[in-house]
Image (cartoon, grey):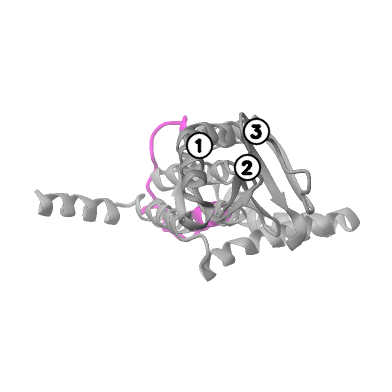
């Protein structure tokens, strides 16, 4: 049974249309499991560059639009000139697009944006937008696979629109918090009873990887690893409300005794 299962996985990995999405899924799993690695820092580069281009756009909009449009637009324009070889999006493009959208949505599910995951989603989106048309341009038309179903053209726009709508309505953030809330409350009450000094660091609390657990008044707070860019942010369990002396920290009530907190002093 084990050998047949291994053979099945080997078949999926080597099957055309699965390799790219599986690599992307592995990168997502690594970013979630180990949020502090040099590789994760590389994912931030496209976000930083995109922010720099957007800032440039306020002063030089033509230059900014050119920088944004050329890497993606040029392959698409070249492909349109040879549109007779244009094939509908295949399995790898659709699965990759769905994974990219899910990653971007999950990046907005914490108390602050997870810029590593968002950068990974941006990298994946750029790769899809560039590699798919380039592959069709460079591959012999006879060898190109032409999937059936005109519905394939509508999948990625609909998935992207659905993801943007969910993020705009804060559904990922609310869902992750509500699913994690029972475990977070149990952790907070147990930690307060045993003493914050004995709290485990770097452990999963519900759906969040918690570190730097600190006592705050009659409650506690912890940092969510990966959330935020320059600021430190996380969740605070404060049955008696935020402390009077906040030392520059910001507390925002979420539900019950739970607050999000942010320390902008590191910026």
Give the mark nearest the N terminus, 3 or 2: 2
Residue 139 lies in the magenta stretch: yes
Q: CB under 8 Å between callouts 1 and 2?
A: no
Q: From which residue to which does the magenta span run? A: 126-153
Q: Nearer the viewer, residue 266 or 244?
A: 244
Q: Name the residue at 47% across, 30% down.
A: 151
> Farthest residue toward the right?
59
Q: What element carries label 3?
A: strand
Q: Is mark 2 on a helix, strand or loop?
A: loop
Answer few, some or many: residues within 10 Å of disc 1's Cα (few below 14, many 20 plus, some between 14 and 19). Answer: some
Tell me, yes or no, if residue 66 can be seen here. Answer: no
Q: Residue 185 carries which label?
A: 1
Q: Residue 222: x and y, percent? A: 58, 50
Q: Mark 2 points at which residue?
A: 218
Q: What element carries label 1?
A: helix
Q: Name the residue at 58% across, 62% down.
A: 43
Number of marks in the rendered image: 3
Q: Name the residue under label 3.
A: 254
Q: Nearer the viewer, residue 66 or 266?
A: 266
Give the mark nearest the N terminus, 3 or 1: 1
Relative to residue 175, is residue 102 depicted above or below?
A: below
Q: Residue 252 carries which label?
A: none
Q: Is residue 214 left or right of residue 144?
A: right
Relative to residue 48, is residue 157 depicted above or below?
A: above
> Farthest residue toward the left?
1
Distance between mark 1 and mark 2 Cα atoms:
14 Å
């Amino acid at each position: 049974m084990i050998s047949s299962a291994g053979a099945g996985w080997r078949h999926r990995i080597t099957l055309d249309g699965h390799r790219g999405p599986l690599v992307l899924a592995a990168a997502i799993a690594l970013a979630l499991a180990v949020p502090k690695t040099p590789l994760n820092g590389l994912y931030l580069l496209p976000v930083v560059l995109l922010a720099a281009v957007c800032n440039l756009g306020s002063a030089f909009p033509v230059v900014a639009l050119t920088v944004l449009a050329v890497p993606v637009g040029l392959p698409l324009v070249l492909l349109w000139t040879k549109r007779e070889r244009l094939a509908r999006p295949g399995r790898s493009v659709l699965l990759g697009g769905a994974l990219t959208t899910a990653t971007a949505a999950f990046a907005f599910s914490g108390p602050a944006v997870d810029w590593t995951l968002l950068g990974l989603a941006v990298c994946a989106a750029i790769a899809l937008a560039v590699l798919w048309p380039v592959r069709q341009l460079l591959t012999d038309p006879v060898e190109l696979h032409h999937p059936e179903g005109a519905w394939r053209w509508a999948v990625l726009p609909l998935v992207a629109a659905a993801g943007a709508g969910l993020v705009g309505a804060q559904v990922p953030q609310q869902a992750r918090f509500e699913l994690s809330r029972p475990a977070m409350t149990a952790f907070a009450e147990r930690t307060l009873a045993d003493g914050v000094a004995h709290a485990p660091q770097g452990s999963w609390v519900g759906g969040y990887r918690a570190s730097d657990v600190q006592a705050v008044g009659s409650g506690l707070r912890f940092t969510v690893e990966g959330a935020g860019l320059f600021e430190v942010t996380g969740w605070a369990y404060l049955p008696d409300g935020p402390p009077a002396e906040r030392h520059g920290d910001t507390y925002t009530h979420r539900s019950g005794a739970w607050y999000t907190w942010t320390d902008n002093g590191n910026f």
